[in-house]
Amino acid sequence: MRRHLLLPLILCFVTISTFAQEKTNQDPKPIGWKDIPSWKSISPNSVELSPDGKWLAYILSPVEGDGELLLQKAGDPESKKRYPIGSSSNPSISFSDDGRWIAFKESPKDKEKKANEKSKGKPLGEKLILIDLLMDKKTVIEKVSSFSFNGKSSTHLAINLGKEGANGDAKGSDLLMVHLASGKRQNIGNVLEFGFNKPGSHLAYTIDAENKSGNGLYLLNISTGNTQVLESDTATYRSLSWTEKGDAFALLKLVKDKKYKQDHGKVIGVKNLANPQITVYDPKKDSLDFPKEYTISPNRKPLWTEDLTRLMYGVHRLELAKKEEEKKSEAKDTLALSEDKKIALIKSDTTIKSVADLQKAIAKMDSIKSKPMVSKDDPTKPDMTIWHWQDSRLQSRQQVLENQDKNYSLWALYDLASAKNLILQDSSLKDLNILPKHNFALGEDLQAYELDINLDGQNYRDFYVVDLKTGERKAIFEKFYLPNYASYPRSSPDGTQLLFGKDGHFYSYDLKTGMQSNLTENIAVTFVDTEDDHNVVKPLVSPLGWSADSKYVLLRDGWDIWQVPLSPKEKAINLTQNGRREKIRYQSRFVLDPEEKGIDLSKAQYLRMYGERTKKSGIVRLEAGKSKLLAGTKSLIWEDANINRLSKAKSADVYLFSKETFTLPTEFYVTDAALSNPKITTENAPEASKFKWSSGVRLIDYVTDKGDSLQGALYLPAGYEEGKKYPTLIYYYEKLSQNLHSYSNPGFSGTGWNPNVYTSNGYAVFVPDIVYELDDPGMSAVWCVLPAVKEAIKTGIVDETNIGIHGHSWGGYQTSFLITQTDMFKAAAAGAPLTNMVSMYDLIYWNSGGGNMSIFEASQGRFKGAPWENWDSYLRNSPVYHVKNVNTPLLMLHNDKDGAVDFTQGIEYYNALRRLKKPVILIQYKGENHGLAKLENRKDYSVRMMEFFDFHLKGAVLPNWMEKGIERLKLESHLEDRAF
């Protein structure tokens, strides 16, 4: 009886234990770094509607591993199908124009790629997946390089198959033409380049075969299947370029010329596709208009002018080939002499007693490499560089731009009617921008100012207009000041007007008459960006652009958007009306037609709006009148979220937009033109529910020590309890509060920072804004950050005894400076920090090759002049000169190949702190640049930075690498133990 009573009790206990275990397994847990490699998320740029609006495709990929393409009916997430795409960071996806077909690539799997890298095997091929959306039929094609549907026709798919093995000197590979309806395939061999015209009626392609046999230009009529050989020669045909309408195309023909290093170039133009009219311009046959020391360049694609009367192309100077005959002769003499020496040595070798000994002696001599003879007339050249004070560009900058300079070409054109070549540029006008409609070009020259630009950062240009029919050049602006890009002259869609900024106003310039008009002088607001705190004069707010009819420009004043007419008979209209009054910024316009030429004011326009103080965002619509937009916005979405990425199906009124918050991953919604009843269509971060997330966000208002009213975002830790204080990390980079509702996808960043991972692990995260006073970039951080943190502490959320700070690059500088001015912070992590503003000023920004001085004086540095003109400011704002004040433990990340902030900046600060026996650890990853690129390094530093803060702010166990460092001889095993 006792036994029977015990059995139910035991079963009950097992059931309760099992339930408790299941509940424990289901409870969300903090996001760990080892959870992140398998973390799947949507690649936002991969989300695409089919042109007919019926289908939606997007990529879901893990941080490390294999991704998948999700395909579904746009309004029906339940119809979702999944297709593996392997390991690819940027997979190719394309819908056919009629929306019936989708094609995408499937890459090799992550494990296959890694195994292949270890074995140093040949590159692995990619597959093409073609899906008939109407019939739900899948076709797989192996070893694909690229692919393209035939435009509007949507009847064929051209697939460039990867080249396998050597085929002599042939550069072409197989092109597979697939007839979509029937599935029939045609293989065209040795195709180098191909391209459909926009209507999809024709395919132009070039052949590059072994020994150039059959090389030429071919035109395939898609509907008839007929192929015409338009040109054939022992030459290379490349750089195919269709006109936008698809009624003509141009390309280059390159012929070997032993006399020169470069090929001899010719340009080919083809129009009248039904009965092709072919124009070949050969500069060798033009002794009158084409200089003999030049040829047509392969480095610029040729193009037709819009009216099909002229061909445009690049030309560059020829360079004589080096004489090889003398070198070959010298090599033969050296070889003969070497053989004579061998025979003499063998004859004098008394140890050779047998044939076997002789063979060994010969083998030994063959293994010895003889030194090449150097002629007295051909001495060895030194490997060196001459840095001259009058160089307009630093030698390091010239080195970075060396290939660009080598490949530089001048614009030229060939007029078919007059059969004349016209070179449009020379060395005095290196930059030329061809304007719409191909009647004019805008030339710019900075040679007179280039040295000063690279010294003090103040940008000037001389601008010219070039008539593309006569080649006549006319100066229009001399020593034109560019405080920022907003002032840069930009053309109207009809190519007859320029919009430019000068002295705090916007002007128009008529290219035909030379007349200019001040467009904003009678508008009662300023278009100067008054919040730009760099050392430049009257920087303007970037304009939205020209109207499609070239009669209006849409300008932003920082709050509202204005419709400004070119005609003095009309008045400017404030389209949005309430921006400045209600502190709403109308930031940008959503471009719903990628092929638009200017803003079509006869159609409704969608704008993104953002609440400067509320951090709300949304979308409004401006309604269209007959020829211009009507004043007044219609609010379609306005939420405490980040609303963005509005797009439209190409040929249907189906719209798509994204929405996210700090705690809700980016999702996409399908809707109509009114953005009503949006339906969520994506499923981002499918594992998110297994983990803990921030409990929300608070917006903190504060006043800086200089009286500026700013804001900061305070992100609550997961599981936040009212009245409980939490360890807090402060992160900053100039102004970031606008990202209050931005989602941060868990991952391994190049800086080790990820706010969602930290809040998931029990930290509060505070992100305050910083604004700057000139000559005080470091003190500005003190004046902004300390009042912000004090205000955040008042919320009762921040544990004032456990606050850490972190920033990278400019934020790293703020970190390294802040700890010299306060002991408020218990720990600090600085990534790639500037630490000595005096020495940094004269160093080189190696990624660009330019000097730092222009950055310091006119860009982020915000200094007025050089150190020797402003010693107090530079010393006052340099962390290294206040190093004795540091009491905060510091973790630094600085890499030896940092091309932005020189590695010596980290070393200076580290050594100064070490000299004073201050607690500092410097982490250096070999060969890495300004941020970490290699996944294994990003993983490692992410873990170490959190371990650093966990110890100082949470009292976690002190890791061995933090306690006493790691000896070099033990480093390898230390890294092996930590790798994951």
Image (cartoon, rainbow, N blue to C red):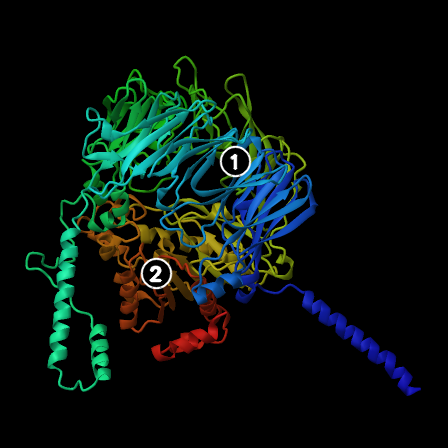
Relative height, residue 191 to residue 222 (above, below): below
Question: Residue visible at 10% across and 81% down?
Answer: 348
Q: Nearer the viewer, residue 823 or 51?
A: 51
The picture places residue 210, in percent across and down from the top left corner, at: 38, 46
Residue 98 visible to the viewer: yes
Pick whichever, 231 or 318, lies toward us: 231
Query: Of the residues shown, which amino acid type is indicated by label 2?
Result: Ser
Q: Considering only vertical position in the picture, is 426 above or below 385?
A: above
Of the pair 165 and 295, the residue shown nearer to us: 165
Residue 608, disc: 1
Residue 481: give x, y in percent of width and height. Answer: 26, 33
Which amino acid, by three-letter code, is at mark 1?
Arg
User: Residue 443's image quarter?
Assistant: top left
Mark drawn on residue 816: 2
- Residue 18 marker: none
Point out the tag, 2 or 1, that comes first from the N-terminus. Answer: 1
Q: Image quarter for residue 686?
A: bottom right
Give x and y (percent) for residue 57.
60, 44
Looking at the image, the residue that sits furthest to the right is 1
10 Å neighbourhood of mark 1: few (<14), some, or many (≥20)? many
Q: Secondary structure at mark 2?
A: helix
Q: Is residue 847 left or right of residue 289?
A: right
| Res 863 seen here | no
Give the residue at the far top of this rendering.
Answer: 569
Check disc 1 and report its element: helix, strand or loop. strand
| 625 vs 256: above or below | above
Crowding near the residue tagged with mark 2, few <14, some 14–19, many ≥20 C-alpha atoms within 10 Å: many
Residue 875 placement (x, y as % from top left):
24, 56
